[in-house]
Amino acid sequence: MTRRKHDFFLHNIESINVIEVGKPLYKTIKGNWLSEYFKNDNPIVLELACGKGEYTIGLASAFPATNFIGVDIKGDRIARGSKIAERKGLTNVAFLRTDIKYIEEFFNEGEVSEIWVTFPDPHARPRQEKHRLTHPHFLALYKRLLKPGGTLHLKTDSPELFAYSVEQVKSANCVDLQYTTDLYTSSLNEIHLGIKTTYEQLFFDKGFTINYLQCKMGAVL
């Protein structure tokens, strides 16, 4: 392990806004995010595969009366987001270090108001389909976590993943589906407040378009 990665992992151990294995809240936080961590009754929004948490932090800065949790398995990435949130004094931000397939171990049914999936790995090969974060298995999972009428958002630079995701969302009988293959020229542009991750900005600067969808979920399958 490099010295830099060691420093990131040490930061996560010491940081209050990182929930990971070995910390007391890791085993008790399910159903208790508002009472044990945020200490308020505000809505909870998740960013899955959050990376460095750029979107989590951007949304948290824009909506101080909402709680945001970035979820990722990579400790060094989460540490970067955690440090930025601390520097900004954001008390409505937390980071959960876990694999997304285990997310139900940390949230009760109906505990979440919105879920953002931002630039996930497209898992382009057919045999990788089950790992796509818009696979029917994951969509069913999101429905359980979301409150009735809760919103799912997806942003991706992959046309193939996006086409697949639109079809899966339709098949899951989600309602109020809205989507575009060119977010920044769309009327849906205002929804994401112009927040761009570093990777998204690079991709956008090269002239590529950003795909976006949102729909209402939240009913248990």
Image (cartoon, rainbow, N blue to C red):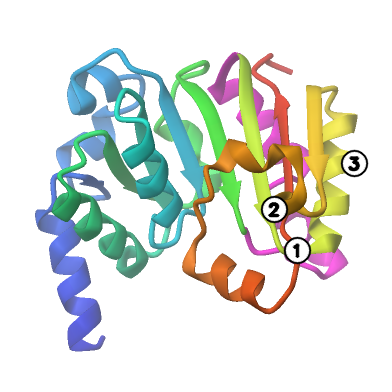
- The magenta span reads 120-148
Determine contact: label 2, label 1, CB under 8 Å.
Answer: yes
Query: Picture quarter containing residue 107?
Result: top left
Question: Element type at marker 1?
Answer: loop
Foreground tag (2 vs 1):
2
Residue farthest along the bottom direction in this orientation: 2
Residue farthest along the left direction in this orientation: 14
The location of residue 90, given as percent across then percent down, is: 21, 41
Residue at screen point 72% across, 50% down = 183
The numbered mark, 3 or 2, whose residue comes first in the sequence reads 3
Kind of residue at disc 1: Thr
Query: Picture quarter containing residue 200?
Result: bottom right
Determine contact: label 1, label 3, CB under 8 Å.
Answer: no
Residue on which the image places disc 1: 209
Foreground tag (1 vs 3):
1
The location of residue 86, given as percent across then percent down, is: 16, 51
Residue on which the image places disc 2: 184
